[in-house]
Image: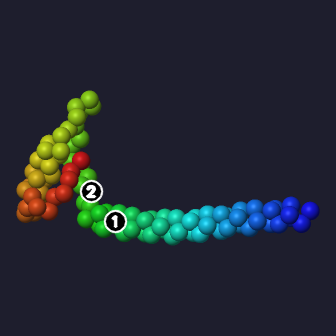
């Protein structure tokens, strides 16, 4: 009977050890998740602060897909009309 109890105690201790290892792994994953979420928030914040939304630019006709170059040309045309010097190096993307 004592051998059976010792055997069960050994199995229980091994299972507790595995559970503790898994709990520690989960804590590490949660820390990494928070770190990645924070890094993502910072990246989005940095990217968004450089965005400029222009209203009043004519949209393409229904069914016509406008290229990035078409959109950029419209933005440049508008900037020229209002007298804003807009070097190409400050434009990351248009859509």
Sequence order check, earlier mark of 1 and 2: 1
The answer to whether any part of residue 12 appears in the image is: no
The residue nearer to you, when weighing 16 against 11, is 11
Residue occupying the point 75% across, 62% down: 11
Find residue 10 and report its image quarter.
bottom right
The answer to whether any part of residue 46 appears in the image is: yes
Rendered-image quadrant of the N terminus:
bottom right
Find residue 69 and report its image quarter.
top left
The residue nearer to you, when weighing 63 against 35, is 35
Q: Which mark is residue 31?
A: none
Please determine whether, in this image, residue 25 is positioned above or below residue 61.
below
Taking the image as shown, residue 15 lies to the left or right of residue 3, namely left
Residue occupying the point 43% across, 65% down: 36
Query: Residue 31: where, in percent of width, then height?
Result: 51, 70
Q: Secondary structure at mark 1?
A: helix
Taking the image as shown, residue 78 lies to the left or right of residue 12, namely left
Considering every residue shown, the one lying at the far top of the view is 63
Taking the image as shown, residue 35 lies to the left or right of residue 6, namely left
Other residues around mark 1 within 10 Å, as few (<14) / some (14–19) / many (≥20): few
Query: Residue 42: where, in percent of width, then height?
Result: 36, 69
Residues tagged 1 and 2 counted as in contact (Cβ below 8 A)? no
Query: Residue 13: where, in percent of width, then height?
Result: 74, 67
Residue occupying the point 14% across, 49% down: 72
The type of colouring in the image is rainbow
Q: How many marks?
A: 2
The residue nearer to you, when weighing 78 against 93, is 93
Q: For the residues marked 1 and 2, what is the alpha-carbon distance in whole angstroms?
A: 19 Å
Find residue 65 and report its image quarter.
top left
Q: Secondary structure at mark 2?
A: loop
The residue at which mark 2 appears reads as 53
The residue at which mark 1 appears reads as 43
């Amino acid at each position: 009977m004592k051998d059976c109890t010792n055997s069960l105690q050994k199995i229980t201790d091994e299972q507790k050890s595995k559970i503790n290892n898994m709990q520690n792994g989960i804590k590490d994953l949660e820390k990494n998740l928070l770190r990645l979420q924070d890094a993502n928030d910072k990246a989005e914040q940095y990217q968004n602060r450089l965005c400029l939304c222009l209203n009043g630019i004519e949209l393409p006709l229904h069914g016509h897909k406008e290229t990035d170059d078409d959109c950029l040309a419209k933005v440049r045309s508008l900037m020229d009309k209002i007298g804003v010097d807009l070097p190409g190096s400050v434009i990351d993307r248009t859509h």
